Each structure stands twice: as C-alpha cells, then as structure tokens.
Image: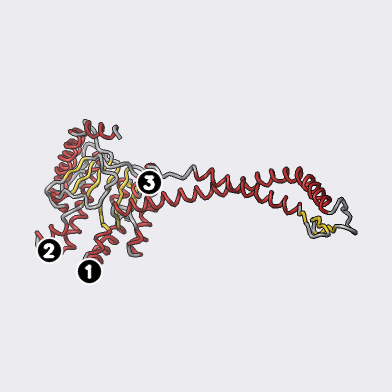
Amino acid sequence: MVRYDDAGGAAATTPTQLLESLGSFMRRCLFRVLAVGPIPHHFAFIMDGNRRYAKKLNVEEGAGHKEGFSSLISVLKYCYELGVKYVTIYAFSIDNFQRKPAEVQNLMDLLLEKINELLKEQSIVNLYGIRVYFIGNLKFLSEPVRVAAEEVMMATARNSKVVLLVCLAYTSADEIVHAVQESCKNKSDESLAVNANQVSNGVINGAEKVEKIYSLTVPSIEESCKEKASRVCNGAIERVKGTEDINGATVCTDGVSCDYKSEAQALRAGRIGNGVTEGFEEKQGNNPIINLVDVEKHMYMAVAPDPDILMRSSGETRLSNFLLWQTSNCLLDSPAALWPEIGLWDLVWTVLNFQRNHSFLEKKKKQL
C-alpha cells in the first residue's frame, strides 16, 4: 500500500527513499538560511580532476569523466534550488584537442551521449526548465556533436527559468580574438555604407553645382573664345572664309583653337571630383573607433552576465584560459576536492565566502 505525506505526495516506502526525502528537506532548510544573504546570480565551474580521480581509484580515465557528469547533475540541482540563475561549466577546451586521439575520441563520444540525454523528457533540462547554450568555437567539434548541440539549443530555446552555458571547444583567447574580429568587420561594414552614401551625395551635389556653373559660364566662355579667335584672325569670324567650327571648337585659319566646351568639361570634372573628394576628406576625419561595448557584445558569453563566483575543483588556482575577460571582479574559489568528489558542502562554503566578500566585490564593480 502506498502511503501519502502531509503535502499529498507519495510518501517514501524504502530506506533509500526515506534518506533522499530527509536529505532534500534538510537541503531546502539550509538554502532558506543561505537566502537571507545575497545569492550569486551566476556561478561558473572549471570541472578539474576527472582523470586524477580515475587514477586515484585505479580505473580507466573514461570512468572518471562519467562520475564527473554525475557530480555535475547534482551541482546543477543545488544551484538552481538555491536560486542561481546562470551556471557556466568548462566542458572542453580547444587545447584539449592536443591530447591523445583515442582520449579525445572517447570524450567526444561521451559528450555526444550526454548531450543526447538532455533531450529526454525526464532530463534535468526539462525538470528545471533550463535553457542550454553551447559556448565556443563549435566548428572544432565533430559533426555529430555539433548537430546534437544545435538540437539541444533549439529544443530549449523557449525555456526561461534558468540557464546552463556549456563552454565547448572554448578558450578565452579564442573568444577575445573572435569578438575583436567581429567588431572590426561590423565597423568596416558600417563605414563602407556611410562612405557609399556620402560619395553618392557628393557626386549628386557636385553635379548639380556644376550644371548651374556650366549653364552660367559656357556662354561667356564661348564669347571669350570667339573674341580671342576674332583678335587672332583680325576680326574675321566667318566660317567660310576664316574659321571653321569643328565639334564645338572655333578654329582659326592660322591654326589657333579655343575649345570652350573642353574648358567647360574640365571645369565640370574638377567640380565633380572635388565633390567626391570632399566626401572622402570629411570621412577621413571621422575614422570608425572600436569601443569596449562593441567588443563585449560580440563575445560568446554575451548571452549572460559576468560570473559572481568561479570555482575550480582539485585545489588548482589557474584559470586555464577560461573566462579571462569576464572574471575581473568575481570570487575565485578552489576547493581541494576533485570534481567527481564535489558535493553540497563545497558549494555551501563557497556561497558563504561569496556572501562575506559581497560588499567588497560590489564596490569594485561600481568603480569600473
């Protein structure tokens, strides 16, 4: 017979279920106490120590990564129950592709398996309403892994409760280079569009001005030429006797010519050329400048705020090319436990440390 608890749910009927229910209740009580203080909005993890864990237990390396995935699921549950909105994990670095081919292939196979599990109905993604982003230079991934990652992102695009960012084929150096390149390309496109518009306007305005000038000056140029020809030809401007009009030029019989149309065309070309040049000169004084905001909006991590906490397991204190741009004012923590050994209390102590330093961290952020 199934028993029911006070809340109307099915009561635990086995010792394991009883322990899980008791643990869940105590965890909720603990998180309510922690919620009295500031809760981190964004928690980032470097999941270090999977291979050392496997070596420690004298098992194959793949077993360490599988245990690490189980720890990840537990940590995600703790974070989301605590009220953390964003969680970022460093799943695979671009530098990791330099490992042994067999190890890289095993990791890719494991990633493909775990990514596909996220699409299952009872996965943590669906239970918590998680939106998933895969962050990094995804072109480095094998096609099956990249396609699976894209499917997960599309399938979770409407989820809005919490966010999971999986840094895959990622390094911070690659992210910064990508952001700068995209910023330059964007500014170049904007500059070309503005130049084309100004050149077009310069030509049109220049042509309009020349038309007016041409209409005013051509008659006077023609008269001047004829007067010149008249003087040279002793006052005789007669087409039959003394001059011939060839293509608009008055030519004297003694070989002297006065091409008033050529002069007018030269004047027009000069004016139009000046109109175009003026457009370029004006733009040269207004070269496009790449600002901080331009770079930041092209970062892979632009979809999330900067982390409040960065935890690296296994006691290591190196950032290993992870979120170098985003972690200038966040708490760094490095518990001694290897990643598969990370548990609730490691997370709790890190949050307490964050709360103790919260006012200082906020002050540093305001100084930026």
Q: Which mark identifies residue 102?
A: 1
Badge 2 element: loop
| Image vertical order of residue 253 relative to residue 157, above or below | below
Name the one closer to the observer, 133 or 11: 133
| Image vertical order of residue 70 relative to residue 310, above or below | below
Tell me the residue that label 3 is attached to. 295
Residue 199, position as x, y percentages in the image: 59, 48
Residue 342, position as x, y percentages in the image: 15, 49
Badge 1 element: helix
Residue 343, position as x, y percentages in the image: 15, 47
**Which is closer to the viewer, label 1 or label 3?**
3
Badge 3 element: helix
Distance between mark 1 and mark 2 Cα atoms: 16 Å
What type is the residue that disc 2 sits on?
Val
Q: Give the residue at x 65% y 44%.
A: 205
Q: Which mark identifies residue 59?
A: 2
What type is the residue that disc 1 sits on?
Ala
Q: Which mark identifies residue 213?
A: none
What type is the residue that disc 3 sits on?
Val
Q: Give the residue at x 89% y 55%.
A: 238
**Which is closer to the viewer, label 3 or label 2?**
3
Q: Give the residue at x 43% y 44%.
A: 289
- Placement of the C terminus among the 4 image quadrants: top left
